[in-house]
Image (spheres, helix red, strand yellow):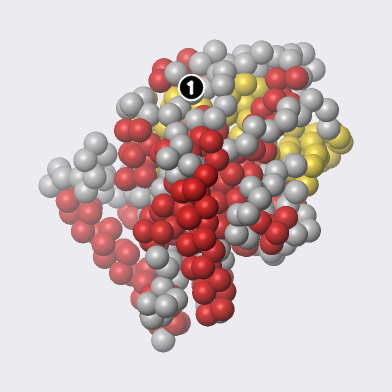
Amino acid sequence: MAIGQLLVAPFQQLDSLLGETWEAIRGQSRYPDVPPLEPSLGLLGEAFLDRTFTLSTSAMTGVPLPDRLRRMRNEVASARALYETQGWLANPESYHQEPPPLESAALADDVTWYGPRRLRFGRLVFESGYEPHPGEPGRDRWLDHPSNDTVHAYVLEHEEPRPWLVCIHGFGMGSPLMNFAGFRVAHLHETLGLNLVLPVLPLHGPRGQNRFSGGEVLEPDYMKMVFLFAQAAWDVRRVVSWARSRGGGDVGIYGISLGGYVSALVAGLENDLACVIAGIPCVDFPNLARDNEPWIMRRYGDELRVDWSMVRTLSHVVSPLALAPRVPKERRFIYAGIADRIVHPDQPRALWRHWKEPEIHWFSGGHVLGVMNASTREFISRCLAGAGLDRAA
């Protein structure tokens, strides 16, 4: 039964996409404010690749044990009561603790393959220091993780002072090779002349314990997701403070996918950022999790079924849509794929509306290959130049 559903589901998604393509031919769009699809075989292929990716990650999640689902439901209910008592639901900004600045940390030389050549970079390593609030359900379990508290970040720095761009990767990334390829660092570092620092998100790369980077994120543990976003914002803000201590003036942030969520969250917490670019951003975690929930979990009875209303309430404290951006509107930027079938267009559209409709670039493509779209590089270059960060060598 499970194998059959896994085989059939991508073709069901393709059928849905064909319906959207027909709407595009007729000049219609499924989402207001989003351009209609431009029919092509390439576009269909990208959307199909997106759905295949989500099905693969669902298969890797496996079937959660009933005891874990009961624990999750109990913890979410307890956390909701705590958050309401503490006033964090009414004022989500107050949930986030102010991280101490990171002015010195170990920076060692490292090397990786980047295309046909070996690329030398710095590896920044420091202790995160993040802790969930006392009394939060799941706090001890989070702190007991053997490798998550050690933050790794990859650094490409010019000899003379230059502006910095903090690049926040997506789900499944976290290694030097994946991060450098995903952000096309040769263009950002060599052509545009920026200093770059690429922090590894919690539970990813060397911070995780799963063979697949970020694989622990797939488990249905929604306290873990709250802590992941809270710690990610904490760690990125410490990395921003480190970049400022290195000189070069302005510091901007640029995130893709899951990193787009984190960059939008940090933009609501950190002052004096030069710009924020949210690429193919997820900003509504409950909807994303529900859309990609393993099909077999929907067969559980009411006792074990996920209470998505409760999850939405809980995740409000780490939602980018719950915080007012501190970056001026003219320095907020978004790009998103019209055919994205992992982060549907309604998510970047929601951020665009929340951010008072700043500049947004809709490209004709999907999610997995979105960062490789030629038009996104041109858009990013223009955004960085407009924010004063382009220092072409």
Q: Secondary structure at mark 1?
A: loop
Q: Compared with residue 242, is residue 41 higher up or lower down, i.e. above or below? A: below
Q: Compared with residue 64, is residue 210 higher up or lower down, i.e. above or below? A: above
Residue found 62% across the figure and 26% down from its top = 165
Q: Nearer the viewer, residue 189 or 383?
A: 383
Residue 18 lies left or right of residue 319; in this view the side is left
Q: Name the spot of residue 216 as percent of width and height, x first.
A: 62, 62
Q: Compared with residue 212, is residue 110 higher up or lower down, i.e. above or below? A: above
Q: Amino acid at mark 1?
A: Val
Residue found 24% across the figure and 36% down from its top = 33
Image quarter of the N terminus: bottom left
Q: Residue furthest front?
A: 85
Label 1, residues with CA under 10 Å away: few <14, some 14-19, many ≥20 = many
Q: Is residue 20 visible?
A: yes
Q: Name the spot of residue 90 as percent of width and height, x first.
A: 42, 40
Q: Name the spot of residue 230 as percent of width and height, x first.
A: 59, 44
Residue found 53% across the figure and 36% down from its top = 94
Quadrant of residue 333 in the image?
A: top left
Residue 46 lies left or right of residue 125; in this view the side is left
Residue found 21% across the figure and 40% down from its top = 32
* Number of marks present in the image shown: 1
Residue 73 lies left or right of residue 202; in this view the side is left
Q: Nearer the viewer, residue 68 or 20?
A: 68
Q: Residue furthest left?
A: 26
Q: Name the spot of residue 229 as percent of width and height, x first.
A: 57, 46
- The residue at which mark 1 appears reads as 327
Q: Is residue 46 visible?
A: no
Q: Nearer the viewer, residue 236 or 377?
A: 236
Q: Compared with residue 88, is residue 305 higher up or lower down, i.e. above or below? A: below
Image quarter of the C terminus: top right
Quadrant of residue 247 in the image?
A: top right
